[in-house]
Amino acid sequence: MAKIKSLEDLMKIKDDAVKNLKLRETGKRGKIVVAMGTCGIAAGAKDTFKAVVEELSDKDIDDISVVQSGCFGLCDAEPTIEVKLEGSEPIVYGHVTPEQAKRIINQHIVNGKVVGDLIIKRGEL
Amino acid sequence: MLKPITILVSVDSNSALLGARHYKNYLSQLVKKYNLDSITDVLETGSFGNYGEGVLISILPENIHYSVKSEKDIELIVQEYLLKGRRVPSLVVEKIEKEETEEKKKNVEERVVLRNAGEIDPKNINEYIAKDGYQALAKVLNEERIEVINKVKESGLRGRGGAGFPTGMKWEFTYKVDNPEKYVICNADEGEPGTFKDRLIMEGDPHSVIEGMAIAAYAVGANKGYIYIRGEYFESISNLRKAIEQAYEYGLLGDNILDSGFNFDLSVRLGAGAYVCGEETALIESIEGKSGRPRLKPPYPPVSGLYGKPTVVNNVETYASVPPIIINGPDWFKVLGTSNSAGTKVFSLCGNLINKGIVEVKMGTTVSDLVYNFGGGIRDGKAIKMIQTGGAAGTFIKPEEMNTPLDFDSMKNYGISLGSGVILAINEDHCAVDVALNLMEFFEHESCGKCTPCREGTKVIVDILHKFSKGQGSEELFNSLYDIAETMEASAFCGLGQAVPIPLRSILDRFKDEFMAHVGVDEAPCGVCKFPKKKKKVH
């Protein structure tokens, strides 16, 4: 490890480490649930999950938690993800490839616009 | 890649005995087996405060606490929660909600010293840095030494080991002595029976102690420090050593810290489990390699301590309080407590309570709040008989006196000691004579034997109490206990002997009737003491 020589060095380490801890924070703005049932995994949910996590960290979004769950019961539309933002109704998206996942994050999470062409269901499952 | 799910396993010396480390490894194994290791972090952390019946784990960011009692529970959590996203209600531990209603507010802890315990991985310096760690050190290195001391003085921080001496003044005395060689020592020889707060601080957040010591060393002009720690605190020792190693690697200890020209070396010294070594001069003797015997005071350690050099000796909790004071300012700390006792205090709750563990609350919290709100009341629906506050050398009180607020002045105002922050609840099944005997046997055993009043006094007290527990007591013997107490208080050499009369008098004052019930009867009235059977008269 490099020696810390100044307050700036210290803050640099802090900024890096904070990212890790931010992921543990509770009481976030919303969450993304990725369905990881057998059907989802077979359809590539793992890659989708990875893409979601990567895109969030690339964009420095730390107020959204990512959770995996079992099958939503929408096996024909796998991989499916559910986006739950505070104060608005949950949206389920279907056929979410890694590329589509990035689109959802950029359009829905960042800009607050629902991605119309991928919606499977609105409201609570 | 960042991992979105973090599982924290609370590993401290209590949960380690319940298999916490094994569960953690098993959990990591399962996570790997199900290919979840790219998205899940399994980490060890310090104590969450309360001890449940099993090992506590917390899953973040969902913030669910589970209590794990077997490998099966781990399997269930992995299969149900991690794989399928369902909670496992049978294992969920209810956590006290932070905020909301007035009633709930009373139950909220104020965490200053324990700010990171149970939240970060104590073996990872980066996590401490992420929680503003070492910023206070960086800040003070740009300040004048006396400024730092004045800040600590202003904050009203007082020693958390029991005596409550103002920390800033102690530092100032040491600062004023002109000597190129000075030392800072951390008293981590937590020997007071019932106290385990320091252990959990060191296990959960070792860097806060190290940073506090480095700040103290800079302020008084010392370049060498020792942490004197009980040899049986394995977890604390290994966490501290690891933390010191990491701090050296980052250059936060050693030569020319943060390019300021300030050098500070820190190492750990192990004690061998003698109660008297918690007394600062005996502790210093022990670090010097001699047997732990107290020295004649004055001179006090700030003038002549380790190797005859000016030395600051502070408690673990005191050092851990320093970095937040530097960062947030003295006024912030002052507001937390009562007028003469600033800040918060970590209490160790033990005895016949439902929730045992540590809590950190504002100074001036009442005994009943600690027992009922935080401790959950008395186990098994029994009635409470007495509470000992402040540790073995603290006072016994009756349930009627439980509304007393605890701070450094409560001894002066109400005759109830704060000490090292122990709340030992004793239920109706126990006998006052037996409790007193048990405690005095401890002091008899731990008396180092250097001075006569303590060596002989504790022995005579134990002999007399033995007589009571065998039904051979008398009013005269009862009164003679007060005489011994007076003699010891006036003439014992160090704090150990001088403190023995405090618990003794408080229990005699409050439970005289119970002692007297043991006199002149054939059968013990308490069901605890065993009177020898009278020989049958031979006709």
Image (cartoon, coloured by chain):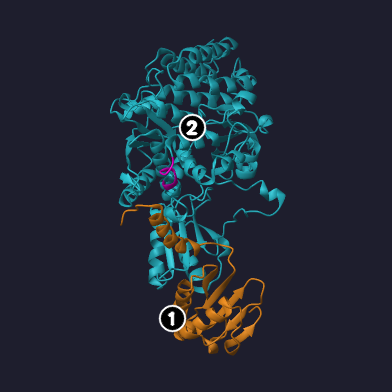
Chain colours: A orange, B cyan
Q: Decide: is B493 above or below A66.
A: above
B174 or B391: nearer the viewer: B174
Name the kind of residue labelled 2 in the image.
Gly
- Looking at the rendering, in which quadrant would you find the C terminus of chain B? top right
Q: Which residue is mark 1?
A: A47
Q: Residues within 10 Å of mark 2 (few under 14, many from 20)?
A: many
Q: Decide: is B130 above or below B33.
A: above
Element type at mark 2: helix
Q: Quadrant of residue A50?
A: bottom left
User: Is residue B141 highlighted in magenta?
Assistant: yes
Residue closest to the far left: B289
Q: Decide: is B80 above or below A18.
A: below
B199 or B57: nearer the viewer: B199
B189 or B31: nearer the viewer: B189
User: Is residue B499 highlighted in magenta?
Assistant: no
Question: Label 1: chain?
Answer: A
Q: Position of residue A24 (x, y in %)?
A: 50, 62
Residue A23 is left or right of residue B405, and the answer is left
Q: Position of residue B505 (x, y in %)?
A: 57, 19
Element type at mark 1: helix
Q: Which residue is mark 2?
A: B168
The disc placed on residue B412 is none
Residue closest to the far right: B102
**Residue drawn where x is 50% and y is 46% of the image:** B327
Residue A97 visible, this orientation: no
Residue B122 is left or right of residue B86, and the answer is left
Q: Which residues are magenta?
A: B138-143
Q: Decide: is B204 above or below B348.
A: below
